[in-house]
Amino acid sequence: MDRLTAMRVFSEVAHSGSFSASADKLDMSRAMVTRYIAELEQWLGARLLQRTTRRVTLTDAGENCLRRCQQMLALMENVEEETASHDGELRGQLRLTSSMSFGHAHLAAAISDFLALHPQLKIDLNVSDAAVNLVEARIDLAIRISSEPDPMLIARPLARCDSVLVASSEYLAASGAPKDPAALTQHRCLSYANFGKSVWRFSRGDEATQVGVTSRFSANEATVLLHAALAGGGIALQPTYLANPYIQSGALQIVLPDWQVPAMTIYALYPSRRHLSPAVRALLDFLVGRFAGVAW
């Protein structure tokens, strides 16, 4: 048995709580995942997982084994990285997380270009807007959009994130364009569940205002709201990195162009400077250069 692979399989099953999901993630058959777990349990002489028809959970022995497996896997990754530093090649695997909208719009292409420069490196990207504990999930780098990043993490700015109100020409033709922010209360607004769901803030020069909007359609992901706006569903608050191609093509129009909404920042977040691997440092520098001075 390849014990390191078995540890990697066990760690993934413990994290996902599913043999099938782990098989898909590791590009293995479900039978192979089951075999690795069984052989690891046989080698250790203990049951590591409790299996029911609905879920997989860790036993007490499994909890202890998971901590040791994670230590061993991290040590192996460090060995690979230190070996790579002697011949100039970056090796191993990096784990990233990003919002789905930014991952789709820009990060996927950036990662592809970075990997072309480092053929011995692998990257696993988890796209999700949910909060993730970077240490527990063994995430090397999180790309997040925020006005106030988590103070417990190291934050490196990548780019400014501006947003605009947009709607389709069909919606504006049918409902009319609002003349000022207060008029938004008379419109169908598409709101982002994780940010500014009921209150939208605006500024124009020294003037500032906020509007309480009532939304019949909210979602936790910006791309969903973008497509709802394209379908004529209403007015959406969108990041310019996502909306600009549709504005330029005429599929969407900017609403209240004289008013600005608060800008945020796209950050790369990581747990500690002390244990930053050469591969993570290289990716950080690449992303900073990639997104420096972008005009979204």
Image (cartoon, helix red, strand yellow):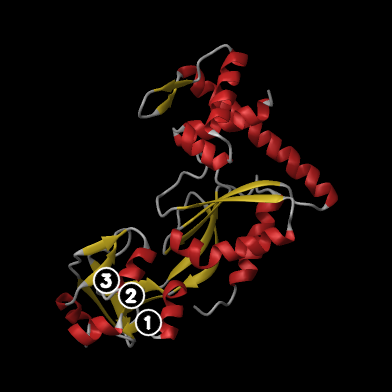
Would you identify the image quadrant in which residue 227 lies? bottom left
Identify residue for label 1: 251
Name the kind of residue labelled 2 in the image.
Leu
Q: x, y (%) of residue 260? A: 35, 80
Q: Residue furthest right?
A: 87
Please name which of the two marks, 1 or 3, marks the residue nearer to the observer: 1
Can you identify the residue that label 2 sits on? 230
Mark 1: which secondary structure? loop
> Label 1 near label 2: C-beta < 8 Å?
yes
Residue at x 55%, y 32% (from the top left corner): 11
Report crowding for label 3: few under 14, some 14 to 19, many 20 or more residues within 10 A (C-alpha).
Answer: some
Q: Marks 3 and 2: CB-CB under 8 Å?
A: no
Instruction: Tell me where residue 9 appears, x and y as whole percent.
Output: 57, 32
Using the image, tell me which numbered label, if any, was put on residue 200.
3
How far apart are the two marked residues, 1 and 3, measured between alpha carbons? 23 Å
Q: Earlier in the sequence, mark 2 or mark 1?
A: 2
Instruction: Please name whichever residue, 102 or 147, is drawn nearer the observer in this view of the structure.
Output: 102
Question: Circles 1 and 3: CB distance less than 8 Å?
Answer: no
Check disc 1 and give the amino acid type.
Answer: Ala
Marks 3/2: CA–CA distance: 20 Å
Q: CA distance from mark 2 to mark 1?
A: 7 Å
